[in-house]
Image (tube, helix red, strand yellow):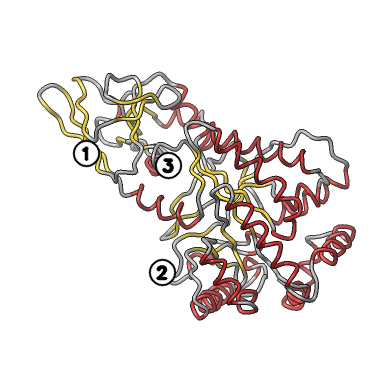
Amino acid sequence: MNFRTWLAKRDPLYILQRGKNLLQRYKLSPSVAMKRVDRVVNSLADYGCAPTFPTPGVVIESRPAYFRELQERGVEFSVHSYHHIDLKSCPPQEARAQLIRAIEAFERHGLEAHGFRCPYLSWSDALLDVLPPGLFGYSSNQAVRWDVITESITRRQAVNFGIVDNLYIPKNANDKACVPWMIGGLVEIPVCVPDDIQLYDGLELGVEAIIKVWTRILNRTHQRGELYNQMFHPELVDIDEQIFPSILLSAKALTPAVWITRLRDVSAWWREKNGFKAEITPTNSGLQVDFTCSPRATVLSRGLDLPGEPWADGYQRLETRRVQLPAGTRPFIGISAAAPAWVAPFLQEQGYIVDTTETAPACGLYFDPQTLEEIYGEVALIARIEKSDAPLVRFWRWPDGCRSALCISGDLDALTLWDYASRIVMH
């Protein structure tokens, strides 16, 4: 992205205010920024949380010993390009070279990097197509916007918010399930917005108002059993360290539990979960279902007389990995072979047992193309299933009985004003 393109995505007042904020928050020396990072790491550790910091390779190379020390304390680092530039505006091979150069810098300095996040969340299918297989385990680039702001805002504040929103190009949480998914060989782990830059710098909300906004997201992701991957920026630690304790305490009070973890652990779990199988075998009296999965798996049932303990939403958590079902009972999701191609793989990735064979119409729930035409988006499809009274057995999305997951991932874009100045030069 050249400087003219960069300028076109921002208006003069936004650039002026952003420049003023950066001059206040960063110095020529990295010491102030490093102290901020230490503060947020220590604050999160008090609540059993370790952050993930997507960090440019050039920043890693400026203070490698410092980043190694943070890694030893449980902090995860992921690649944030080598230079902080808009990779979507680069030719795919140039963007690929940025990511490879960054991972080489991480490896050279003894730092692990399991995934990547593009600056400005500027990913593209073309970039993913040219990445060497196995270079990364996950990406975290798709924003999901939660419409949870009820506070009154001015026109100028709305413009500032919208500038950042347009950079992120988010999907709407009313339609998009905020859960990981496989894309090629990567686990894509979506990011939740609005973030702290949008709320504090953009809408000029105070600490209590931001707590309310982020707590609404936390509660909605928990109710829907999804992922709250809260993106923040360490330059706003003065604000964030007042907010995170409230969010983490609220998360710890929810039941079933919230899995508080790092992006690398979400990625590893999602791959593990996607290997689970349910083998269905006819018997003289009905069906036998064998769940092949790890001990951490959460296996649920509803509307069936099976051994288990109450969980949530009418489900119980099964005590066994083998169940016997009476004749005529097929507590699975039947999908017509003529259904849109995305439907069956999506439902399977959510843990439902999907039947697309000739027995699909005999399942407790069956979706034909006409029915699916009436349902818009992933969220509506899941809601239709969960609001039905049909019996079900299924895998849940998260391990160890947790209902939802929470990650805190902070884009560590810079340590000094020089880092920001170099970004302008690169553009």
The residue under label 2 is 133
Which badge, 3 or 1, comes first in the chain's sequence? Answer: 1
Which quadrant of the figure has residue 296? top left
The three-letter code of the residue at mark 2 reads Pro
- Measuring from the top left, give residue 348's x and y in whole percent: 37, 41
- Measuring from the top left, give residue 100's x and y in whole percent: 52, 76
Q: Nearer the viewer, mark 2 or mark 3?
A: 3
Q: Please give the count of numbered marks on the rendered protein.
A: 3
Of residues 138 and 129, which is closer to you in this image? 138
Which badge, 2 or 3, comes first in the chain's sequence? Answer: 2
Q: Is residue 169 above or below residue 381?
A: below
The three-letter code of the residue at mark 1 reads Glu
| Labelled disc at residue 291 | none
Q: Could you tell me which secondary element the residue under label 2 belongs to?
A: loop
Which badge, 1 or 2, comes first in the chain's sequence? Answer: 2
C-alpha distance separating marks 3 and 1: 20 Å
Q: Could you tell me which secondary element the residue under label 3 belongs to?
A: loop
Looking at this view, name the residue that lies furthest to the bottom: 108
Mark 3 nearby-residue class (10 Å; few <14, some 14–19, many ≥20): many
> Residue visible at 47% across and 59% down?
138
The residue under label 1 is 279
The residue under label 3 is 398
Along the horizontal axis of the image, is 297 left or right of 12? left
C-alpha distance separating marks 2 and 3: 26 Å
Q: Is residue 239 above or below residue 397?
A: below
Q: Could you tell me which secondary element the residue under label 1 belongs to?
A: strand
The three-letter code of the residue at mark 3 reads Trp
Q: Quadrant location of the C terminus?
A: bottom right
